[in-house]
Image (tube, grey):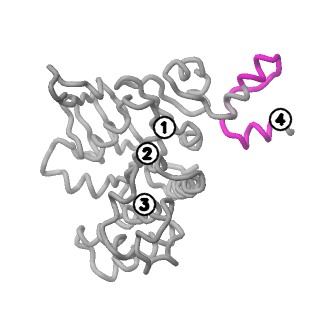
Amino acid sequence: MAKHAERTIIRIEDLVFEYARDGEPGPSRAIDGVSLDIQAGSFTAVIGRNGSGKSTLARNINALLLPCGGAVYVDGFKTSDAASIWEIRQRAGMVFQNPDNQLVSAIVEDDVAFGPENLGIAPDEIRRRVDAALGAVDMYGERKKSPHMLSGGQKQRVAIAGVVAMRPKCIIFDEPTAMLDPQGRAEVMKILGELHDEGITLVLITHFMEETVGADRIVIMDAGRVALDGPPAEVFRHVGEIRAMGLDAPLAVELGERLRKRGHYIPYGLVTVEEMVAYLCR
């Protein structure tokens, strides 16, 4: 995992966000007093069932939504300050669930160049960034293709390259694998690991519990609040609470629980299949 300085890049203070409800009195509260500090270079996974508020939280970090109460700061800039939006968007890029919603050009390399062009980057530097970003997601060989000719996983890799080319300090992934097959999911998660190794701050919003095990920190949300928060090994000691929130534990954690119930000694903290296999085969 990447080494990072203990510097807060995202600060969320008592965040409240409400949606208006059509034809019903009063708003619906999606985020209810959430406070989080996210450190530079860290990898934070945010998980919860549908309606838990996790995607609303992501959009508040990127200033696509603005707080109804409390505050969000990105690298010291307050998201509700209209004059800071440009600075925030340069520092916190976002990758969405459906890559088709982020692809805007007819040629892959033009799509990746779109963001840097809007930042006013010099053409020679844009060329270097586009080539490097496409190389980072293993799509350089497809740079002259039309996005509609690509698979879902390839499209998502191009969308990630477009954000990487803007060189943000932080990237927020809002359920980036939800529409992909297992191979596409694996490809995207491999890229996230590589970006983390490079020191980019990652915030992954997901409903796949297995995708959280490589994070430094897991935040589980329920009914707009933080229910559990900590390193994977600590969070997955609370399997009963996790199930009560309508979520499943990762395969290795489930297996450990079952073996313990049968009287076998299995240490806590084994959260990946690789760790469990290594322990059982030692």
Q: Is residue 115 above or below residue 59?
A: below
Depth check, mark 2 against mark 4: the one in front is 2
Whichever of labels 2 and 4 marks the residue nearer the N terminus, that label is 2
Q: Residue at x 46, y 73 (%)?
A: 132
State the extent of the magenta-drawn residues as a range: 257-279
Badge 2: few (under 14), some or many (20 or more) residues near its Cα, within 10 Å?
A: many
Q: Is residue 35 magenta?
A: no
Q: How many marks?
A: 4
Q: Are marks 1 and 2 in contact (CB under 8 Å)?
A: yes
Depth check, mark 3 against mark 2: the one in front is 2
- In terms of depth relative to the viewer, which is nearer, 96 or 192? 96
* Tag 4: amino acid: Leu
Q: Secondary structure at mark 1?
A: loop
Whichever of labels 1 and 4 marks the residue nearer the N terminus, that label is 1
Depth check, mark 1 against mark 3: the one in front is 1
Q: Secondary structure at mark 3?
A: helix
Instruction: Name the side, left or right, on which 13 lies relative to 237.
Output: left
Whichever of labels 3 and 4 marks the residue nearer the N terminus, that label is 3
Q: Pointer 2: what residue?
A: 175
Q: Secondary structure at mark 2?
A: loop
* Tag 1: amino acid: His
* Tag 3: amino acid: Ile
Q: Residue at x 33, y 37 (%)?
A: 57
Q: Pointer 4: what residue?
A: 280
Residue 125 lies in quadrant: bottom left
Q: CA distance from mark 2 to mark 4?
A: 32 Å
Instruction: Name the side, left or right, on which 245 lies relative to 250.
Output: left
Badge 3: few (under 14), some or many (20 or more) residues near its Cα, within 10 Å?
A: many
* Tag 2: amino acid: Glu
Tell me the tag on residue 148: none
